[in-house]
Amino acid sequence: MVKIDAHHHLWKYSPVTHGWINDEMRVLKRDFLPEELQQELISKSYQGSVAVQASQSEDETKFLLEQAAQYPFIKGVVGWLDLQHPAIEEKLEHFTRFDLLKGLRHVVQDEPDDNFLLGKDFVYGISVLSKYNLAYDILIFPKHLKVAYEFVSRFPSQKFVLDHIAKPDIKNKALSPWKEDIKRLALHKNVYCKLSGMVTEANWQYWEKEDFIPYLDVVFEAFGPDRLMIGSDWPVCTLAGGYGEVMGIVETYLNPMDEMTRNKVLGENAIGFYNL
């Protein structure tokens, strides 16, 4: 089995670049670089990873590509480009010369317009991604799921993956309407889902593995074992737990399942989706 952590971040901390890291998250106000992550991967027998953007700049994309070129365990990069830029195709031509660029992401959850995904220029940017064989990571809150359904329906040949199971309110044990909206989104067979980012939606100090079972049940029923992939969301996950603890949530859930299912969720699906 080849195990892949399909979602983590890397950064050289800057108060300006990483302004989203508030005082409640002060443990994240330092550098998080590949050498440290590699030790975490080795501790849990993961052979590779996918680095995902944490700030919205081309410099961020360049930084991640440089790290991936230097550290072979980073099998792919999900970067950021301005998909609304009038010269987006020129930018894609340039950045897709780097084979390790596998996808793009925009921090839609922070956009003031809840219908951001449907904006004309953004939609055009998404429409050209498949031409360059790039996936797109959808980072949203539950309130955006209905818009996301309309969004992905416009691009049946584009590969999408929903980050962090759309961040349901695990802390308050709320399932609806997230549950119904997730199931509807999953009807689009070109949409995958990352089993990541869950601990930071729970009570950071007092979560139990059992807290996540209702949410994992929903996404397994909705997406099935062929469209799910494990991700740590390191180092953001360290707000609520260590790397091994966090990965153990999904690994423990998978334990009763057959070997084929475990192999898919722990690595094969990420390899296939991102062409690693």
Image (cartoon, grey):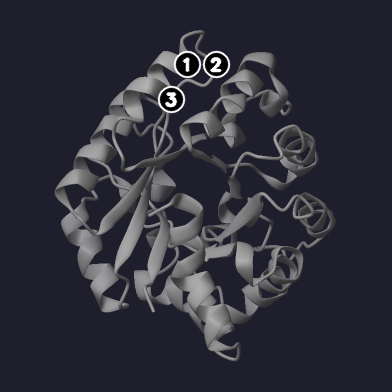
Whether residue 242 is visible here, answered yes or no, is no
Q: Residues within 10 Å of mark 1 (few under 14, many from 20)?
A: some
Horizontally, residue 125 falls left or right of residue 78, namely right
Q: Residues within 10 Å of mark 2 (few under 14, many from 20)?
A: some
Q: State the residue at coordinates (72%, 29%).
A: 114
Q: Do the residues under discs 2 and 1 have CB atoms within 8 angstroms?
A: yes
Q: Earlier in the sequence, mark 1 or mark 3?
A: 3
Residue 37 at what x, y percent from top left?
25, 60
Q: Secondary structure at mark 2?
A: loop
Q: State the residue at coordinates (26%, 38%).
A: 65
Q: CA distance from mark 1 to mark 3?
A: 8 Å
Quarter holding the C terminus is bottom left
Query: Of discs 1 and 3, which sits in the foreground?
Result: 1
Q: Who is closer to the viewer here, 46 or 154?
A: 154
Q: Secondary structure at mark 3?
A: loop
Q: State the residue at coordinates (20%, 38%).
A: 66
> Residue 147 falls in which quadrant of the image?
top right
Q: Which mark is residue 81?
A: 3
- State the residue position of label 2: 84
Residue 255 at what x, y percent from top left?
54, 88
Mark 2 residue type: Gln
Residue 208 at what x, y percent from top left?
56, 79
Horizontally, residue 276 falls left or right of residue 256, namely left
Mark 1 residue type: Ile
- State the residue position of label 1: 88
Query: Of discs 2 and 1, which sits in the foreground?
Result: 1
Q: CA distance from mark 2 to mark 1?
A: 7 Å
Q: Who is closer to the viewer here, 5 or 212?
A: 5
